[in-house]
Amino acid sequence: MDNIITGAIAVSIFMAFVLGLAKSISALPFAVIVIAVCCLILTDFFQSAKQGLREERQDKSDTAP
């Protein structure tokens, strides 16, 4: 669960920085790249969180008497 919290904080800080940078530069090719990278980082975060929760549940069920 700690990984999800820290991951969410990291993703939000990264996206705020990169989206702000894209807004200040205001060049279309850079904005397209930033949007693509943000989509990829969100996809990776959700897949990692899903896998982490699945492993956490499995570990709990393995140690149950």
Image (cartoon, rainbow, N blue to C red):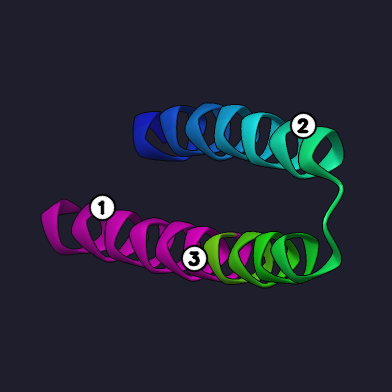
Estimate how packed mark 2 is, as few (under 14), some (14 to 19) or many (20 or more) residues with alpha carbons within 10 Å: few
List x then y, in percent, for residue 63.
12, 53
Amino acid under label 3? Lys
Residue 31, placed above or below residue 39:
above
Confirm whether the magenta stretch covers residue 60: yes
Q: Which mark is residue 20?
A: 2
Question: Left or right: where does residue 51 sit relative to residue 38?
Answer: left
**Marks 2 and 3, Cα distance to the nearest angstrom?**
28 Å
Quadrant of residue 30 within the rendered picture? bottom right
Q: Quadrant of the C terminus?
A: bottom left
Amino acid under label 1? Lys
Disc nearer the start of the sequence (1/3): 3
Find disc 1 in the rendering and name its residue: 60
Quadrant of residue 12 within the rendered picture? top right
Amino acid under label 2? Gly
Residue 38, placed above or below residue 16:
below
Choose mark 1 or mark 3, whichever is in front: 3
Find disc 3 in the rendering and name its residue: 50
**Marks 1 and 2, Cα distance to the nearest angstrom?**
41 Å
In percent of the image, x 54 and y 61: which residue is there? 41
Q: What element does badge 2 sit on?
A: helix
Q: Which mark is residue 14?
A: none
Do the residues under discs 2 and 3 have CB atoms within 8 angstroms?
A: no
Disc nearer the start of the sequence (1/2): 2
Question: Left or right: where does residue 1 sit relative to residue 32?
Answer: left
Q: Which residues are magenta?
A: 42-65
